[in-house]
Amino acid sequence: MKMTLIEKRFVNRKKKSERNIKIIESDFKLMNLTKTNTILELGCGVGFVSVYLAENYQFNVFGTDFDDEQIDTAKRIQPEIKNLHFQVEDASQLTIEDSSINLVISQNVFHHVPNWQDAIKEIARVLCPGGYLTWLDLTFSNLVKNIFLPFVKNYGLYTIEDIKSTFFIHGFKQLLQEQTAHGLMNQHHLLLQHS
């Protein structure tokens, strides 16, 4: 789903990217990175995180976003690096080859994906065996989900239990779970590994 101008200003803040990078760096301590060379960032926005990973780790990074304007901006403002690629992708219908990615990063993306279950299926498809997923996003209480689900068609509404059970169905095991915000809308951080 394409975001509004206000949403874009909010998600493309440098401070937000710095917080997201800290989460990824923390996750790296729990991963075996020796075989990690290809990363897919879903919902890269204007590309700050993708650039950081390409420059500092020399990973081959694919920064993707559903919004072509975000990708156009990323290509315009970010430095050209041979191991960094920006492209328009739908997280629920990726054009990326099976088992070709070592790490998928999805930070605050799923609540923008109405068919988030398909996105999980696609992540499982593109990840190599033993590949990792770092996932950070909003989750909702059952009450909020049940009230708004009949009316909301362009957003993902799910509980943390919905998310985790769908990941487990698609062959993921949990390495870490943190709840970083509490209330009617919570925020959870998961580190998962694909079998």
Image (spheres, rainbow, N blue to C red):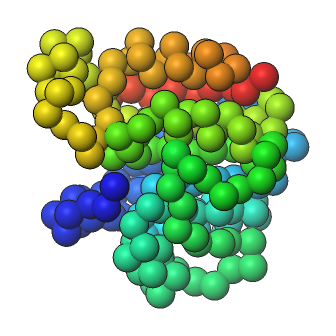
Q: Quadrant of residue 54?
A: bottom right
Q: Residue at x 26, y 45 (%)?
A: 154
Q: Position of residue 75 (x, y in %)?
A: 52, 82
Q: Nearer the viewer, residue 162 or 32?
A: 162
Tell me if 155 is positioned left or right of 49 in this view: left
Query: In which quadrant of the rendered view does residue 102 lie?
Result: top right
Residue 165 placed where, x, y %? Answer: 51, 13
Q: Is residue 36 left or right of residue 115?
A: right
Left or right of 14: which side holds 170?
A: right
Residue sitting nearer the eye, 66 or 15: 66
* The quarter of the displayed image where residue 174 is located: top right
Expressed as whole percent of the image width and height from the top left, the position of residue 179 reads 36, 21
Q: Quadrant of the N terminus?
A: bottom left
Q: Is residue 113 or residue 48 the one in the foreground?
A: 113
- The residue positioned 65% from the left and 63% from the top of the image is 62
Give the percent coordinates (x, y) of residue 181. 26, 26
Total numbered labels placed on residues in the image: 0
- In this view of the protein, can residue 115 be seen by the observer? yes
Name above or below for residue 173 compared with residue 107.
above
**The C terminus lies in quadrant:** top right
Q: Residue at the location (52% across, 45% down)?
A: 92
Tell me if residue 108 can be seen.
no
**As displayed, is residue 19 above or below residue 184?**
below
